[in-house]
Image (cartoon, coloured by chain):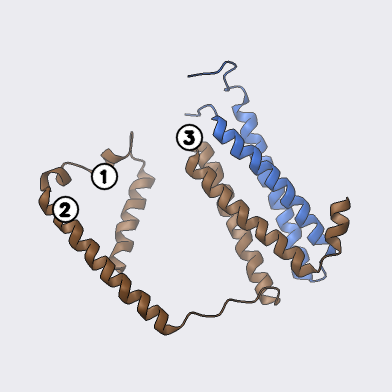
């Protein structure tokens, strides 16, 4: 009760910010919990709670921004974007060369290591789809 | 398919329950004391969702209650 009385004296922007900050914290905790879960159904529960909390955090943030309770950060400069893109294109090029060297140095080892063997037990169809998605996404960066 | 809940999982579930409990109260306070109608409405609906989250966590523990061993396992 006492806490409620103190909180009701806070300006509504501060009140909203308190909820937003806690939602951010809870989202992180659910993500950690999901990654450290042992039972698949417990992992699924934390994943669902993560998605639900993330949605609420996003909605609240949008509402606060629309009502000028949260000032948007200033945009990054185009030069900065270009610099980062340049640097990262170089890094990707170097990584690709390195991987190619590794593959040609040990062709048999790579061929005899299917993706599935790195994960314990059976691969779920969902994981297969995720792998394919990753590969598809990868094409955008080529 | 269902396995006993681990000690670590139990800790996360319990921590999450206290987080959801706090958020329920915070949203309730915001829902009654905010002047912006959209903010009031959103906080009122979020309070309900946090209650559902809390209930989901409790139900999960209840489901695992019978499966939990009574002796420490190696």
Chain coloured brown in the rendered structure: A
Instruction: Please count the marks in the image.
Output: 3
Q: Is residue A48 left or right of residue B24?
A: left
Q: Residue at x 40, y 78 (%)?
A: A81
Task: Please say whether residue A137 is visible from this viewpoint.
Answer: yes
Q: Earlier in the sequence, mark 3 or mark 2?
A: 3
Q: Residue at x 55, y 34 (%)?
A: B8
Dot 3: chain letter? A
Q: Read off the residue under disc 1.
A: A115
Q: Position of residue B62 (x, y in %)?
A: 65, 30
Q: Earlier in the sequence, mark 2 or mark 1?
A: 2
Does dot 3 land on a helix, a strand or a loop? loop
Q: Read off the residue under disc 2.
A: A102
Q: Colour of chain B?
A: blue
Dot 2: chain letter? A
Q: Read off the residue under disc 3.
A: A38
Does dot 2 land on a helix, a strand or a loop? helix
Q: Earlier in the sequence, mark 3 or mark 1?
A: 3
Task: Please say whether residue A142 is visible from this viewpoint.
Answer: no
């Amino acid at each position: 009760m006492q806490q409620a009385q103190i909180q009701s004296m806070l300006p509504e922007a501060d009140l909203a910010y308190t909820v937003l900050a806690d939602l951010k914290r809870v989202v992180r905790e659910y993500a950690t919990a999901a990654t450290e879960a042992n039972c698949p159904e417990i992992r699924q529960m934390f994943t669902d709670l993560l998605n639900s909390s993330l949605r609420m955090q996003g909605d609240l943030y949008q509402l606060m921004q629309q009502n000028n309770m949260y000032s948007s950060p200033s945009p990054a400069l185009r030069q900065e974007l270009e610099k980062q893109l340049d640097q990262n294109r170089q890094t990707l090029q170097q990584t690709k060369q390195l991987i190619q060297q590794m593959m040609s140095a040990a062709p048999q080892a790579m061929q005899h290591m299917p993706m599935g063997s790195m994960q314990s037990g059976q691969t779920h169809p969902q994981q297969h789809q995720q792998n394919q998605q990753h590969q598809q996404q990868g094409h955008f960066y080529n | 398919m269902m396995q006993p809940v681990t000690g670590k999982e139990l800790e996360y579930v319990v921590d999450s329950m206290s987080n959801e409990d706090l958020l329920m109260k915070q949203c309730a306070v915001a829902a009654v004391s905010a002047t912006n109608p959209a903010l009031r409405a959103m906080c009122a609906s979020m309070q309900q969702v946090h209650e559902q989250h809390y209930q989901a966590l409790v139900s999960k523990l209840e489901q695992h209650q019978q499966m939990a061993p009574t002796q420490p396992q190696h």
